[in-house]
Image: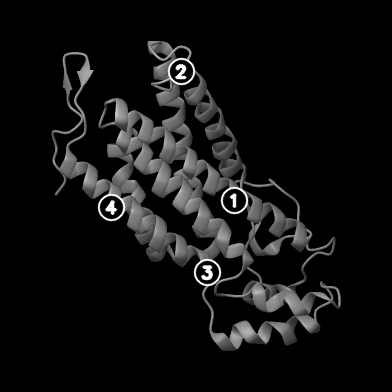
Amino acid sequence: MLPTNAGETVGSRKMPIESSKYVILVGLLSVHALGGGYYAATQPAGTNGIHHGCDNIMRKSSLFTPSAPSRLPLLGAGWRYFSWHPFLMMIGMVGLMGTAALTKKKGGYSNTKLHGIMASAGLLLASGGFYVIYQNKINMGKDHFTTLHGKGKNEIVRGKKETPETHLKLSICLPPTFPSSAGLTAFAGLSLPAVAGAVFLHPDFGIDKSNKLYRKVHKVVSRVLLLLAWGATISGFKTLIGDDYVTLAIFAAPVVIAAPFTLL
């Protein structure tokens, strides 16, 4: 079990997170980011027969241009271009940024610098994930930033609405697409404290690194946005798997467990 006394306060000063607790939480977030990210990236689940049958199914669909079927094997269940979006987002937002937040809780000069490096690396990977889904929507002819976490499989495709006849075919052959309004807000918002942290609070060259108000605002805003980003990973996974709530609960469990220790 996790130690319970890490994060207690002595007077007005918060104690650094214990090493054992830090290792457990970093391990939990890292495994979840890599394993959960890969699992999400290969959803929705489907057999090889369904996957490879999408080409013939879509050749008969009026929703797609004649050139579209040749691209469909890349869009079915399994790894495809879209897969880089959840994979990079999970590693960036959960693995690296979560670890960055925990590392800052250890306190000290070196950990503060390491916190900034890991958070910046996480934002960079998340930027790659954002680019993938943005480009994927362009390729699919879909609108951007329209819902909490995307319209899923019933969207308008290239200006033509899905009919009941093609609903099941599209559900099998097309992965859901996003980014979401929540994900976009978190991604864009986290860019601001990253820049502010580097300019104002860097322990070497921050122009106002001792300002307690700046430090407090940076910490609170960053953690709220990171919580929003973690929530977006869960809602995005829900879009991918549908109503499989057992799998959703298993997927969400690591961040639900880690969030109080990491973000409070």
State the residue position of label 4. 27
User: What whole-number distance in Å separates the C-alpha atoms at marks 1 and 4?
Assistant: 23 Å
Q: Earlier in the sequence, mark 1 or mark 4?
A: 4
Residue that mark 1 sits on: 128
Element at label 4:
helix
Residue at 60% from the left image edge and 85% from the top image edge = 50
Q: Neighbour class for label 3 at 10 Å: few (<14), some, many (≥20)?
A: many
Q: Residues within 10 Å of mark 1 (few under 14, many from 20)?
A: some
Q: In the picture, residue 124 is in which quadrant?
A: top right
- Say which element carries label 3: loop
Please state which amino acid type lies under the numbered disc 1: Gly
Residue 66, percent across and down? 86, 78
Residue at the image position 59 percent from the left and 51 percent from the top: 128
Residue drawn where x is 18% and y is 40% of the image? 19
Marks 2/3: CA–CA distance? 43 Å
Alpha-carbon neighbours of circle 4 within 10 Å: few (<14), some, or many (≥20)? some
- Cα distance between the residues tagged 3 and 4: 24 Å
Q: Are marks 2 and 1 in contact (CB under 8 Å)?
A: no
The secondary structure type at the circle numbered 1 is: helix
Q: Which residue is mark 2?
A: 206
Q: Quadrant of residue 7?
A: top left
Q: Earlier in the sequence, mark 2 or mark 4?
A: 4
Q: Residue type at mark 3?
A: Gln
Q: Tell me the element at label 2.
A: loop
Q: Earlier in the sequence, mark 2 or mark 3?
A: 3
Residue type at numbered disc 4: Gly
> Which residue is at the front of the view, 196 or 45?
196
**Disc with the residue nearer the chain's start (1 vs 3):** 3
Lower sequence index among marks 3 and 4: 4
The reply, left or right, for residue 164 in relation to residue 147 is: right
Q: Determine the CA span between mark 2 and mark 4.
A: 31 Å
Q: Is residue 79 above or below residue 103?
A: below
